[in-house]
Image (tube, rainbow, N blue to C red):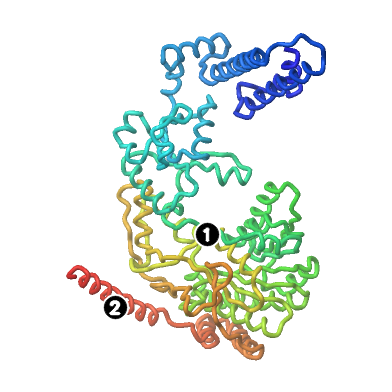
């Protein structure tokens, strides 16, 4: 008794809160009693004490350990299942449940939302335990649904595990299931959408458990509705790596347009890489302020952060900022990006996008920056609008500078970004919330999509791997038909009677966005999703000549003249009517060929 009691005191066995005791608490008790047993054997050998047989000693220790475990488990079970605040009430609750099989907590459970958890792995079981141990929880798990044959047909925490075929709608109804919770972070997007559609159409509310991402970010775990992006698109790519993180660590980084959709995510990603200082620059103070406050809260003073409000077109202001911070890495995400608006504000697009980029390139050279990274767009590929043409001109400026400057330059193209300001999904969400109609410009339009984190990580990784002058592009997977996107969003929202109205193509808009990745025309990188465009850089004299023409055109204050000059300096800038007509004919031919192939297969 002395040995056992002493070792338990040393092991702080009596200092643990057993009502919340987990497996580690019970293992500590077992190890403590095992050490006490060994200690007694040593004392018996070394000291002249009355000995007992080994069998008897082992029996005494076993009985004592069994009693200790039983008392603690009974106490924990009473606390977990009890519906009374006093211990006597808990005691009788446990006895009632054990000996009669009646669940005394059933009355309380009736008031809770019954759920089925898809996934009986670590995440799903963690959710079930959390709900079972929290009396204030609004949910109670009734079953798991899993495909693991080793788990199917068994129980976890008293909750049955069913296979997908066993979990019939009638069986779920028998168990009074009201909501389905997805708790498998690694599930493929197509399979997740398939299951979502199945249960949603059956009338269940479908939610997702955010444990993995929220826990990693230090946030609270919670259940939420699915985002449309999670159901309609492929699993997000993770393109950042340790090598990328190491490159940016302890560097002074300036991000222009840091308050925008892409810029703010670049700031978030960069903050994780422990830069020496992060300078956020934007002309729109509200966006810059929001990301500043977000990062201050997240990093609690551990991130050296500064916000500057200025336009990249203001050479004097930019020079002051370069003089003050001497950034080693400059990421230029500042740009006017809305296609229809820039069609009517051509001079402003040229001034901001082109001459703003020129300012940044020149200041990088003047103040000895190590690297300049430009954020570009797929609309720069054979552009049909002012925005795309200005971005293509920016690419030419950057590539030319790489041939005669001391800074390492690169540009990164990507497609439409999900959830960014002015993008199609937020617009559709607002229209559906307002009862419709959902407006699309043309039912034939297709686009390539990626998430904001993907776009940001791509910019950072490509910039880190750049040698000099590369034009990086990302393999963005399959294109999405905007008509299908609108129909899916309406269906997934559950709102009935929403119309889809075709409004006609906007000025400068393409029917089919150019395929960015034609692997036969691109060079591979160490990342299988990142390619390099083969493009010849123009000389400094050629760039200067083009810029002089643009400057002269802007001085006229005539947007139409400026647009015509932009067509001259960007040879690939085409009129949308030509491109759309050619693209439609090409698509029509491909459809006919596919149709004929289908007929041949059917006949065969």
Q: Quadrant of the C terminus?
A: bottom left
List x then y, in percent, for residue 321. Answer: 76, 67
The span from disc 2 to disc 1 (Cα, nearest Å) is 33 Å
In the picture as drawn, the residue positioned furthest to the left comes out as 603
Q: Is residue 277 visible?
A: no
The answer to whether residue 496 is above or below residue 572 is: above
In the picture as drawn, the residue positioned furthest to the right comes out as 47
Please give left or right for residue 585 compared with residue 350 in the image: left
> Which of the two discs, 2 and 1, sits closer to the camera?
1
Q: Is residue 104 visible?
A: yes
**Label 1 environment density (alpha carbons within 10 Å; few <14, some 14–19, many ≥20):** some
Please give left or right for residue 250 compared with residue 107 in the image: right
Determine whether the residue tagged by mark 2 lies in a helix, strand or loop: helix
Contact, mark 2 vs mark 1 (Cβ under 8 Å): no
Q: Quadrant of the N terminus?
A: top right
**Label 2 environment density (alpha carbons within 10 Å; few <14, some 14–19, many ≥20):** few
The answer to whether residue 183 is above or below residue 580 is: above
What residue did someone put label 2 on? Answer: 589
Q: Which mark is residue 237?
A: 1
List x then y, in percent, for residue 350. Answer: 58, 78
Pick the residue in front: 42 or 119.
Answer: 42
Please give left or right for residue 593 compared with residue 283 in the image: left
Determine whether the residue tagged by mark 1 lies in a helix, strand or loop: loop
Q: Earlier in the sequence, mark 2 or mark 1?
A: 1
The answer to whether residue 595 is above or below residue 172 is: below
Q: Which mark is residue 304?
A: none
List x then y, in percent, for residue 198. Answer: 33, 45
List x then y, in percent, for residue 47. Answer: 82, 15
């Amino acid at each position: 008794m002395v040995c056992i009691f002493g070792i338990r005191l040393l092991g702080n066995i009596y200092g643990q809160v057993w009502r919340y005791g987990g497996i580690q608490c019970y293992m500590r008790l077992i190890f403590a009693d095992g050490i006490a047993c060994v200690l007694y054997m040593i004392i018996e050998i070394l000291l002249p004490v009355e000995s007992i047989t080994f069998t008897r000693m082992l029996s005494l220790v076993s009985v004592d350990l069994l009693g200790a475990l039983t008392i603690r488990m009974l106490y924990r079970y009473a606390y977990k299942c009890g519906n009374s605040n006093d211990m006597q009430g808990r005691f009788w609750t446990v006895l009632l449940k054990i000996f009669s099989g009646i669940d005394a907590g059933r009355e309380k459970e009736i008031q809770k939302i019954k759920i089925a958890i898809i996934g009986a792995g670590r995440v799903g079981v963690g959710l079930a335990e959390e709900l079972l141990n929290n009396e204030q929880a609004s949910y109670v798990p009734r079953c798991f649904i899993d495909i693991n044959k080793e788990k199917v047909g068994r129980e976890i925490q008293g909750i049955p595990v069913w296979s997908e075929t066993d979990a019939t709608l009638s069986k779920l109804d028998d168990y009074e299931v009201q909501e389905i919770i997805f708790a498998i972070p690694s599930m493929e997007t197509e399979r997740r959408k398939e299951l979502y559609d199945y249960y949603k159409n059956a009338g269940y509310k479908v939610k997702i458990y955010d444990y993995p991402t929220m826990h990693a970010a230090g946030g609270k775990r919670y259940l939420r509705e699915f985002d449309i992006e999670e159901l309609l698109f492929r699993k997000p790519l993770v393109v950042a790596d340790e090598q990328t993180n190491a490159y940016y660590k302890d560097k002074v980084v300036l991000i222009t347009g840091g308050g925008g959709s892409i810029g703010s995510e670049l700031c978030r990603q960069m903050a994780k890489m422990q830069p020496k200082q992060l300078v956020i620059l934007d002309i729109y103070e509200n966006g810059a302020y929001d990301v500043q406050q977000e990062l201050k809260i997240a990093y609690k003073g551990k991130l050296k952060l500064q916000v500057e409000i200025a336009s990249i077109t203001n050479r004097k202001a930019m020079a002051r900022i370069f003089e003050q911070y001497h950034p080693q890495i400059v990421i230029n995400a500042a740009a006017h990006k809305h296609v229809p608006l820039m069609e009517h504000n051509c001079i402003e697009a040229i001034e901001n996008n082109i001459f703003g980029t020129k300012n940044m390139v020149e200041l990088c050279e003047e103040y000895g920056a190590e690297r300049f990274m430009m954020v570009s767009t797929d609309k720069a590929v054979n552009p049909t609008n002012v925005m795309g043409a200005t971005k293509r001109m920016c690419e030419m400026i950057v590539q030319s500078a790489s041939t005669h400057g001391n800074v390492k330059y690169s540009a990164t193209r990507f497609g439409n970004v999900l959830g960014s300001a002015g993008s199609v999904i937020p617009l559709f969400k607002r229209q559906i919330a307002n009862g419709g109609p959902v407006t699309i410009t043309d039912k034939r339009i297709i686009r390539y999509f990626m998430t904001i984190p993907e776009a940001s990580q791509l910019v950072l990784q490509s910039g880190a791997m750049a040698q000099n002058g590369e034009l990086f592009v990302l393999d963005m997977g399959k294109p999405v038909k905007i008509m299908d996107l609108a129909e899916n969003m309406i269906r997934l929202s559950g709102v009935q009677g929403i119309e889809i109205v075709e409004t006609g193509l906007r000025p400068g808009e393409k029917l089919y966005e150019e395929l960015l990745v034609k692997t036969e025309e691109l060079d591979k990188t160490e990342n299988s999703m990142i390619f390099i465009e083969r493009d010849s850089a123009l000389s400094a004299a050629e760039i200067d000549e083009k810029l002089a023409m643009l400057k002269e055109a802007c001085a006229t204050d005539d947007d139409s003249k400026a647009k015509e000059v932009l067509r001259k300096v960007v040879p690939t800038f085409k009129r949308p009517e030509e491109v759309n007509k050619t693209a439609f004919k090409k698509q029509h031919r491909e459809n006919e060929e596919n149709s004929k192939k289908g007929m041949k297969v059917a006949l065969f």
